Image (cartoon, grey):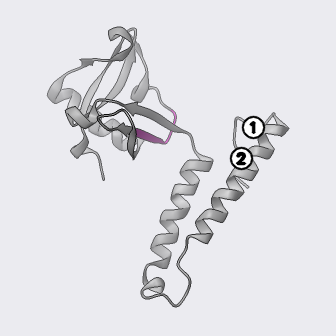
Amino acid sequence: MSENPYARDNPALRDVWDEGYAAALAAIQSSMSPPGEKGWDMSLKHGLFGQELLAAILCDQKTEVKRDRAAWKTGNVFVEHSYNGNGSGIHTTVAPWWAFVIDDYAGQPQSIVMVPSLTLKTITRYWLKKRGPQPGGDGGRSTGTLVPLVSLPL
């Protein structure tokens, strides 16, 4: 079983975490193509690695999650790096992964783009140099960088 740092000292939370982790692994295993289907053996290792990576990200690792309501219109995501003049967001995250939940025109989530935080830091530095800092949410108390969706590794 994986260890959830938030559940370490709470037995009830630990049980829920263990059940969720087991359910995620069972779902991954049940979605695998059975032997004998065309091409299953050639991509099995590659596919299994991808499934295990996603399970590890969702169950084992911290992920910084940001929801962007305007990306569908602007073609950019906002990556915060300061709040009220103090470092925040991408500059202070300890999460190994960053996820953007992208809403459509009606405000409904349509996609999730996940990027390793170190990769996003590099991309953000590039766009910060090109575009400069931009005011963000919370009444302009956030400052960040507009990063084009097309520059994220997809």
Asked whether, in this view, residue 51 is left or right of residue 115, the answer is right
Quick check: is 72 in the magenta stretch? no
Please say if 32 is above or below 50: below
The image quadrant that residue 12 belongs to is top right
Count of all numbered marks drawn on residues in the image:
2
What residue is shown at x 78% (from left), y 42% (from top)? 14
Circle 2: is it few (<14), some (14-19), or many (20+) Cα within 10 Å?
Answer: some
Q: Residue at x 56, y 40 (%)?
A: 62
Q: Nearest the camera: 115 or 13?
A: 13
Q: What amino acid type should be assigned to the residue bearing mark 2?
A: Glu
Q: Which residue corresponds to mark 2? A: 3
Disc 1 residue crowd, few under 14, some 14–19, many 20+, Cα 10 Å: some
Kindly identify which numbered label has been placed on residue 147.
none
**Residue type marked 1:** Ala
Q: Which residue is mark 1?
A: 7
Q: Is residue 92 visible?
A: yes
Residue 145 location, x and y as percent? 27, 26
| Disc 2, SS | loop
Could you tell me which residue is drawn at 59 percent across and 65 percent down?
28
Left or right placement of residue 137 versus residue 96 in this view? left
Toward which corner of the image does residue 56 lie, by quadrant?
Answer: bottom right
The magenta stretch is 94-100
- Up-down: is 139 above or below 52? above
Quadrant (top left, top right, bottom left, bottom right) of the N terminus? bottom right
Quadrant of residue 117 within the rendered picture: top left
**Where residue 97 appears, x then y in whole percent?**
46, 43
2 and 1 marks in contact (CB < 8 Å): yes
Residue occupying the far left of the picture: 130
